[in-house]
Image (spheres, rainbow, N blue to C red):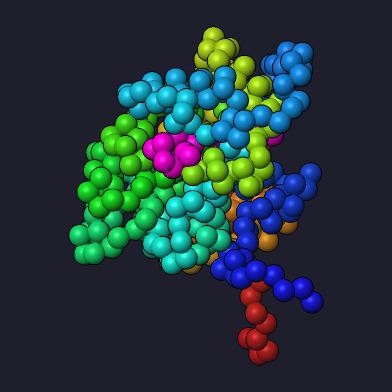
Amino acid sequence: MITLSRRLDDVRGSAIRDLLTLTARPDVLSLAGGLPAADLLPRERIAEAAAAALTDPASVQYGETAGLGRLRDVVAAHETGRCGRTIGPAGVVVTTGSQQALDLLARVLLDQGDVVVVEDPVYVGALQVFQAAGAALLTVPLDDHGMRVDVLAERLAAGLRPRLVHTVSSFHNPRGVTMADGRRRRLAGLADRYGFLVVEDDPYGLLAFDGPPPVPVAAHGERVVRLGSASKILAPALRVGWLTGPAQVCAAVERLKQCTDLCTSALTQAIAADLLADTTWLDAHLSHVRAVTAGRARAFTTAVAELLPQVMCTVPTGGMFCWLEFPGGTDTTELLPRALAGGVGFVPGSAFAVDARLPDAARCCFASLPSEDLREAVRRLGAAVSRRAPRPFHAGT
Ligand SMILES: Cc1ncc(COP(=O)(O)O)c(C=O)c1O
């Protein structure tokens, strides 16, 4: 018997990561994973960048903890453009995926019992990080325009004093919604007034189907730490993410990262820097990804409207996810085994629930499958819904 630290006692396992084993079966069309489409990952351009990087011995060496200078420059320039104020390379820390940025942030900012506000339903990776940090979690609901900042404002006025407020501001995982501009401005104002930090977790912002990406919460105030990632715009396997925020936070994160992994891979940082700095290529790549993904979103929502007319489905304007709400009485956790047996996977809403009960909801990722497979997946989902759960046998009836 080995005694483990109590740190994990309150950390809920990720039902989604567990599900990935089941949905990887070749007979299953998976709407479950948050995986970018394999056919949209730019493998040839990555191979070219890798070959170029490998001519420099520094690409296979340890590097600076805060990240490769070229990558920090390109991220700083991009974030300056998005936020409308100068963000220098010293305000950027490169991390091993933005998941690591979340973890480092929680560990440098939180002590046991500190209050953290999360959205409900929540991005499970954030929930796990805050649970591991021993935070006291409070939830704020979402509606079709993102976080209910009015509810947060009421709770703050009533005395709530969080250390952090976490939000997936654009194309929410799992809810698919985007925070309205007025709410972004108000949230940044509340952070200034009450002295908390907003963690704006934004891996999907550049995946807007029409028009420019949403203006970040960080454009409205300085008490915002923004997290970005190469995972959804280039490739998850690069494991390159970044954090921008106040200098004091960046310095603390850098110090803790020294303990965690010394530095992110110099090779994949060099690849990411090359691709992100090649704006002609990047613009064309992102336009293609957005157009294809928008087509898939349309195919999915059309199929739901036609084949599951009783189901409510969000209308995605970017990102990778749709949120379904089945009519009362459908329990999506019970539906899942029937759906998997019928060859389709999704994630039940309960996997993302903190205080809310979401028994009739489901998260579906429309980004990973071609349109014809999405229609077939929805048909299979419909078949699973209409295949009734076996009734308990009562003698004499
Ligand atoms: C909201 C959100 N934040 C962070 C991440 C982590 O991304 P990565 O570590 O690949 O950058 C994800 C991944 O799905 C996500 O959905």
Picture quarter containing residue 51?
Answer: top right
**Percent position of residue 217, x then y:** 34, 37
Say if residue 376 shows up in the picture: no
Question: Residue 220 or 139: which is nearer the viewer?
Answer: 220
- Residue projecting furthest to the bottom: 396
Picture quarter containing residue 371?
Answer: top right
Residue at figure coordinates x 65%, y 35% from the top left: 264
**Percent position of residue 177, x then y:** 40, 42
Residue at figure coordinates x 67%, y 43% from the top left: 261
Residue 250 lies in the magenta stretch? yes
**Percent position of residue 359, x then y:** 50, 64
Say if residue 79 shows up in the picture: yes
Question: Residue 394 or 101: which is nearer the viewer?
Answer: 101
319 w.r.t. 17: above or below: above
Highlighted range, magenta: 236-251
Q: Is residue 293 left or right of residue 182?
A: right
134 w.r.t. 176: above or below: below
Q: Quadrant of the N terminus?
A: bottom right
Residue at figure coordinates x 54%, y 40% from the top left: 254
- Residue projecting furthest to the left: 157
Residue at figure coordinates x 66%, y 53% from the top left: 17
364 w.r.t. 350: above or below: above
**Percent position of residue 305, x then y:** 48, 42
Question: Residue 329 or 178: which is nearer the viewer?
Answer: 178
Residue 260 lies in the magenta stretch? no
